[in-house]
Amino acid sequence: MKVTLSTHVLDTTTGKPAVNVQVRISHESHESGQWKSLAAAWTDDDGRIRDWPGVVEVPQGRLRLTFATAEYFRGQGQPAFFYPEVTIDVNIDRAIHHHVPLLLSPFGYTTYRGS
């Protein structure tokens, strides 16, 4: 089984999916400790990203998802100064599907390991 990674962003101020949020995914190199950008994608009409352009299999190890929250909230006509982006680091240690939801508001966020 290969490693896959998806995400879902819910705008808790509206109770609806956060559409068109850019998310960048990066991988930390074991050798250098540097981060390598793998891809960027935008959430769909359901607030989800299921596939990453150009990424056939997500590498195991430490991954970073960076959500461009300021751009999203500006597009909604809301203030976006407190959390201009949300960065979530996760450890992928086995070949299974991983899901990282983000519950988002202009002044707070929550994340958890989904299924």
Image (cartoon, rainbow, N blue to C red):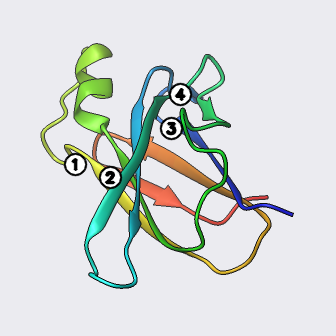
Instruction: Answer few, some or many: residues within 10 Å of disc 2's Cα (few below 14, many 20 plus, some between 14 and 19).
Output: some
- Residue drawn at 47 percent across, 31 percent down: 41
Q: Nearer the viewer, mark 1 or mark 3?
A: 1
Give the residue number, with chain letter if any, for mark 3: 12
Q: Nearer the viewer, mark 4 or mark 3?
A: 4
Q: Give the percent coordinates (x, y) of residue 62.
A: 47, 75
Q: First in sequence, mark 2 or 4: give its number.
A: 4
Tag 2 near tag 1, CB within 8 Å: yes
Tag 2 near tag 3, CB within 8 Å: no
Q: Nearer the viewer, mark 4 or mark 1?
A: 4
Give the residue number, with chain letter if any, for mark 2: 86
Q: CA distance from mark 4 to mark 1?
A: 18 Å
Residue closer to the observer: 115 or 51: 51
Q: Secondary structure at mark 1?
A: loop
Give above or below for 109 relative to 62.
above
Q: CA distance from mark 2 to mark 1?
A: 7 Å
Give the residue number, with chain letter if any, for mark 4: 43
Q: Secondary structure at mark 4?
A: loop
81 relative position to 19: left or right: left
Give the residue number, with chain letter if any, for mark 1: 83
- Residue drawn at 48 percent across, 58 percent down: 110
Residue type marked 2: Val
